[in-house]
């Protein structure tokens, strides 16, 4: 158990719909990362938040957005869903003290299926 | 971040050492080598990281060549639970503001009974 929680575990929805994935980081971790894992693209970085502010963006579509709340939990919003958005979505957290490497702890993921 | 090259798959007998190679010939001076693994569809798990010295922890050992262009992850006594995809990642260790991990295809290690 990494200490990172993600809900829901599974999500099945239809094309065109909007969903929200939730992540609670480990206690004390200020940084949250979102990753997408699909069969054809592998594990890809989407976006990072640090203490409530967006810090970096990766290959995140404009239909996707995220935020980190004052209690440090984060939500990833996916809208106008397409079949190709079906994937595992992982959240990871780390301390990010800025003084060197801090390992990232990954949650169990949310499996999104778009029908 | 520097690119890494790993074999797509490897087999290992249970109880034997598993040696997973990684090439990172374009690594820069401030880039570390990190290893993560992912057991079927679970979240990736950190294993170990290093800069230029060999490192060991309770999970594995990391051997980095003197020129830092390649490294080997060693699982000293592989068990069936070590069957997973192992990712070698090269990334800045300090001085940055974004510590995202760039995953390649990794090596699927299969430990056989």
Image: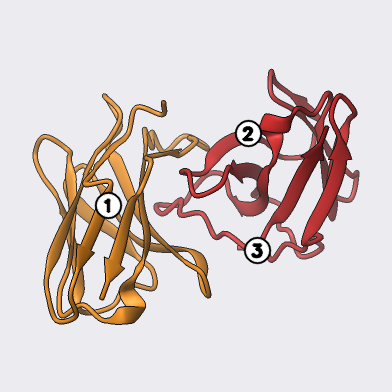
Does residue B82 appear anywhere in the picture?
A: yes
Give the residue number, with chain letter if any, for mark 1.
Answer: A10
Chain assignment, label 3: B
Q: Residues within 10 Å of mark 3 (few under 14, many from 20)?
A: some
Viewer-side residue, A46 vs B39: B39
Q: Nearer the viewer, mark 1 or mark 2?
A: 1
Tell me, for residue B47, which label it has, or none: 2
- Whole-angstrom CA distance, mark 1 to mark 2, is 27 Å
Q: Position of residue B17 (x, y in %)?
A: 88, 30
Viewer-side residue, B59 vs A114: A114
Q: Is residue B23 above or below residue B66?
A: below
Chain letter for red? B
Asked if residue A46 lies left or right of residue A28, the reply is: right
The residue drawn where x is 51% and y is 69% is A39
For chain A, give the colour.
orange
Whether labels 3 and 2 share one chain: yes
Q: Contact, CB < 8 Å: mark 3 with mark 2?
A: no
Q: Position of residue B83 (x, y in %)?
A: 70, 40
Does residue B22 appear anywhere in the picture?
A: no
Q: Quadrant of residue B54?
A: top right
Q: Quadrant of residue A92?
A: top left
Q: Position of residue A58 (x, y in %)?
A: 38, 68
Tell me, for residue B105, which label it has, or none: 3
Q: Secondary structure at mark 2?
A: strand
Q: Nearer the viewer, mark 3 or mark 1?
A: 1
Q: Is residue B11 above or below residue B104?
A: above
Asked if residue A24 lies left or right of residue B30, the reply is: left
Viewer-side residue, B90 vs A83: A83
């Amino acid at each position: 158990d990494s200490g990172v929680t993600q809900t829901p575990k599974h999500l099945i929805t239809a094309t065109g719909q909007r969903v929200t994935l939730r992540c609670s980081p480990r206690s004390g971790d200020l940084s949250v990362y979102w990753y997408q894992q699909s069969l054809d693209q592998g594990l890809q970085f989407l976006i990072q938040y640090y203490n409530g502010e967006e810090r970096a963006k990766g290959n995140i579509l404009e239909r996707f957005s995220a935020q980190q709340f004052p209690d440090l939990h984060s939500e990833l919003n996916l809208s106008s869903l397409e079949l190709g958005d079906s994937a595992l979505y992982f959240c990871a957290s780390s301390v990010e003290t800025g003084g060197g490497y801090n390992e990232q702890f990954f949650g169990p993921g949310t499996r999104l299926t778009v029908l | 971040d520097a690119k890494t090259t790993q074999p797509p798959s490897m087999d290992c007998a249970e109880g034997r050492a598993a040696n997973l190679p990684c090439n990172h010939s374009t690594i820069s001076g401030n880039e570390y080598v990190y290893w993560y693994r992912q057991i079927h569809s679970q979240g990736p798990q950190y294993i170990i990281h290093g800069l230029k010295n060999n490192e060991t922890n309770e999970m594995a050992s990391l051997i980095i060549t003197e020129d830092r262009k390649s490294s080997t992850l060693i699982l000293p006594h592989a068990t069936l639970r070590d069957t997973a995809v192992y990712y070698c990642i090269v990334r800045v260790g300090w001085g940055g503001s974004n510590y995202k991990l760039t995953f390649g295809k990794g090596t699927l290690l299969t430990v056989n009974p």
